[in-house]
Amino acid sequence: MPPRWSRIPDRNDADYRRLDDRMTFATHVAAFGCINSGLWFFHTLNHTDWAWLIWVTGISGTALLLHGVYIFAITNYSPNKNV
């Protein structure tokens, strides 16, 4: 069940931005898991010689890690934008 918001969604609301960014990150994690596990499944099943697969997994994993660091450590969700 998706989260419910008790008031009109507004991107200027700090709580809404935090929830929206974390839901976007969760979607990013799900896409990473689905795409990479599918690629590795077919790579293993068909005994392919996809040398690029390690690069795709590494680059997308690094992008996922950077996205997580940005969302959970860097982003300032304080209501006062002048801080």
Image: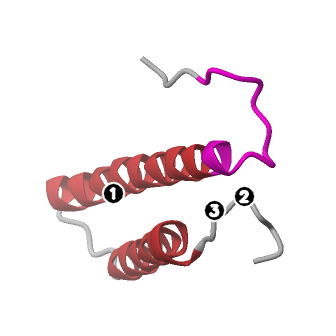
* Label 2 SS: loop
Task: Check contact, mark 1 vs mark 2: CB within 8 A.
Answer: no
Q: Which residues are the magenta region?
A: 5-17
- Name the residue: 75% across, 77% down: 83
Asked if residue 61 lies left or right of residue 6, the reply is: left
Q: Residue 18: which numbered mark, if any?
A: none
* Label 1 SS: helix
Residue 2 to residue 68: above or below: above
Specify which label sits upstream in the sequence, 1 or 2: 1
Residue 39: say if magenta. Answer: no
- Residue of label 1: 39
Residue 7: say if magenta. Answer: yes
Q: CA distance from mark 1 to mark 2?
A: 42 Å
Q: Quadrant of residue 74?
A: bottom right
Q: CA distance from mark 1 to mark 3?
A: 36 Å
How crowded pointer 3 is (Cα within 10 Å; few <14, some 14-19, many 20+) is rated as: some
- Name the residue: 31% across, 50% down: 38
What kind of residue is marked 1?
A: Leu
